[in-house]
């Protein structure tokens, strides 16, 4: 079942996806600009968290949920609560910086 067709996770279960993603990005190797991580941290501080659906992963249990965090950062997925950050432009040049 595709993740977007599943019911939304309750905030108590979806909100922890953001700090997990921030931690992964801070470890380096993602090839993203620091502003992307800053935007995610700003959302965390304001209490905003992306909409994450219940199902959608195949294999690794968190891959669909973390992809939805990335979509929210790019402005392609909604946020709930708090003040969402400005959409972050993600392009193929990020990995080479």
Image (tube, rainbow, N blue to C red):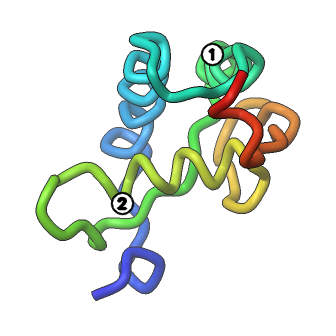
| Coordinates of residue 33 in the picture (x, y in percent) | 72, 21
Callout 2 crowding tier (Cα within 10 Å): few <14, some 14–19, many ≥20 = many
Q: Is residue 61 left or right of residue 17?
A: left
Above or below, comparing residue 28 to residue 31 in the picture: above
Above or below, comparing residue 37 to residue 59 in the picture: above
- Say if mark 1 contacts mark 2, CB within 8 Å: no
Name which residue lies at 38% across and 22% down: 24
Q: Is residue 63 left or right of residue 22?
A: left
Quarter occupied by residue 29: top left
Q: Is residue 15 left or right of residue 62?
A: right
Residue 41's disc number: 1
| Coordinates of residue 88 in the picture (x, y in percent) | 81, 38
Residue 73's disc number: none
| Residue beneath disc 2 | 64
Quadrant (top left, top right, bottom left, bottom right) of the C terminus:
top right
- Element under disc 1: helix
Mark positioned earlier in the residue sequence (1 or 2): 1
- Element under disc 2: helix
| Coordinates of residue 71 in the picture (x, y in percent) | 63, 54
Name which residue lies at 77% across and 36% down: 84
Distance (Cα) linking label 1 and label 2: 20 Å
| Coordinates of residue 36 in the picture (x, y in percent) | 70, 26
Above or below, comparing residue 77 to residue 24 in the picture: below
């Amino acid at each position: 079942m595709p993740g977007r067709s599943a019911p939304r996770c309750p905030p108590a279960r979806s909100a922890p996806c953001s700090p997990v993603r921030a931690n992964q990005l801070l470890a380096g190797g993602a090839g993203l600009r620091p502003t992307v991580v800053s935007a995610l941290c700003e959302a965390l501080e304001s209490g905003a968290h992306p909409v994450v659906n219940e199902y959608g992963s195949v294999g690794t249990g968190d891959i669909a949920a973390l992809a939805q965090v990335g979509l929210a950062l790019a402005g392609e997925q909604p946020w709930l609560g708090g003040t969402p950050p400005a959409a972050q432009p993600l392009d193929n040049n990020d990995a080479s910086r």
